[in-house]
Image (cartoon, rainbow, N blue to C red):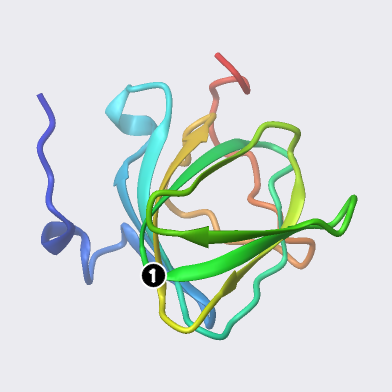
Amino acid sequence: MIVRTIDEIIGTENEVESDTWTSRRLLLEKDGMGFSFHETIIYAGTETHIHYQNHLEAVYCVGGDGEIETVSDGKVYPIQDGTMYALDQHDEHYPRGGKTDMRLICTFNPPLVGTETHDENGVYPLLSKQPVGK
């Protein structure tokens, strides 16, 4: 059994920060679960361009507010506590923090190894040896 707390992640290499978000990576590829599991904070009033070409992601909001815009059709979806969205088509998107920081619980397939950050196109590199969707 694996048991971890956010307090054990904060300040370690498993807490990755940018100007618009912080990702606390609780489960990674090395844990052998077939997915990675993260707490991500999207800062209030920010916008981040993301396009996970190598990963599928499911997200559940457990606090705060904001929105997500899909680039392909310009649709904007409000996000608040209790909202789930899944990027099942490798959707290029813009998550935006609202009036308060958004606290999101995220899963990635294939799992992240832990060092990934978005490149200039909003993409995480594929560092996992596990194929997408397996």
Decide which of 20, 84 is in the foreground and name it. 84
**Relative to 24, 54 lies left or right:** right
Residue type beneath disc 1: Gly
Residue 39 higher or lower than 120, as above or below? above
Percent of width and height locating residue 128:
53, 32
Which residue is at a point 12% across and 58% down the rendered structure image?
8
Report which residue position mark 1 lands on. 64
Percent of width and height locating residue 86:
59, 38
Which residue is at a point 42% across and 29% down the rendered structure image?
35
Residue 66 higher or lower than 6, as above or below? below
Q: Secondary structure at mark 1?
A: loop
- Which residue reaches farthest top? 134
Residue 7, image quadrant? bottom left
**Relative to 73, 28 lies left or right:** left
Residue 88, image quadrant? top right
Percent of width and height locating residue 44:
48, 82
Residue 23 higher or lower than 19, as above or below? above
Which residue is at a point 75% across and 33% down the rendered structure image?
89
